[in-house]
Image (cartoon, rainbow, N blue to C red):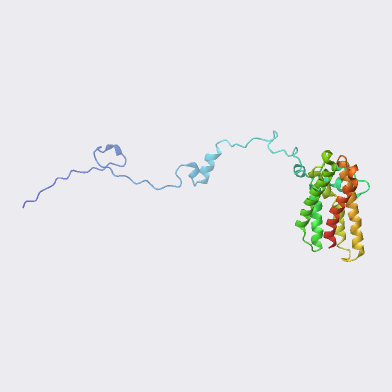
Amino acid sequence: MANKEFKVPPVAFPSAGNPGGAAPNLQQRRMPAPPFQPNSGIPFMSFDIGSATASTSSGPIYAGPSIGGGGSANFDDEEPLLDELGIHPDQIWSKIRSVLNPFRVNHTVHKDSDLSGPILLYMSFCLFQLLAGKIQFGVILGWIVVSSIFLYFVFNMLAGRTGNLDLHTCTSVVGYCMLPVVIFSALSLFLPVDGVIRLSVAAIFVLWATRASTGLVVSLADGGDEHRGLIAYASFLIYTLFSLLVIF
């Protein structure tokens, strides 16, 4: 059998420098992409520190708006942090000093009621009780809340429609008049545990707190003079309850 010869047409590969020179009907090989080069001419991807610095330093830098016309912020017009939080140490000290004299309580400073002073006295009372070996944080806080609500309802039920004593003022009055009980709690650390002396000192401080609380409630609320005795009785029960925490 005779061998048949097959004619294979020549294959021309395009040159790398002239890709358009090959015939359009010829198959072209796909050249692989070159690997990524670090110094590829992209400024933000360059690892050349000098070139990156030179490329970024030529543009303008935005420094942001200036405050008060100068280059730095002006904090002279800012209020103190305690004032922004509603804590005024001068008012707290004035209210505490007014309670120190039970015979001449200055009720004008208590018209602007607050809770910063009562919280301070509450924490002091809890601290002295802790030094005495009594962990009563929750008990004292609960009794302050219940006592404020109790005094609020007692006065408004007595005054009727003319009662203008709100719960916030009651809480402030009860808290600030806790000062004698706090002092008694501090003195009890040096008094004998059992004896007549401890009970006598407790009675003095309870009467002190009762008189201060009664005077403030009567002065701050309208029509308080008519029910002074019942207000004093409710205040006496409140501060007797707190003094029992110190005694026992």
Above or below 55: residue 188:
below
Q: Is residue 84 visible?
A: yes
Residue 220: quarter of image: top right
Q: Residue furthest left?
A: 1
Task: Tell which of 245 and 153 is nearer to you.
Answer: 153
Above or below 115: residue 127:
below
Residue 199: quarter of image: bottom right
Task: Tell which of 160 and 141 is nearer to you.
Answer: 160
Above or below 145: residue 78:
above
Residue 50 appears left or right of 129: left
Q: Residue furthest top?
A: 69
Residue 223: quarter of image: top right
- Measuring from the top left, give residue 240's x and y in whole percent: 86, 56
Q: Is residue 111 visible?
A: no
- Measuring from the top left, give residue 159's x and y in whole percent: 85, 42
Task: Tell which of 198 and 156 is nearer to you.
Answer: 156
The C terminus lies in quadrant: bottom right
Q: Residue at x 89, y 58 (%)?
A: 202
Q: Residue at x 90, y 46 (%)?
A: 228
- Measuring from the top left, give residue 121's x and y in whole percent: 82, 52
Task: Tell which of 134 and 244 is nearer to you.
Answer: 244
Q: Residue at x 81, y 60 (%)?
A: 129
Residue 33 appears left or right of 69: left
Residue 71 appears left or right of 16: right
How many numbered marks does the figure carry? 0
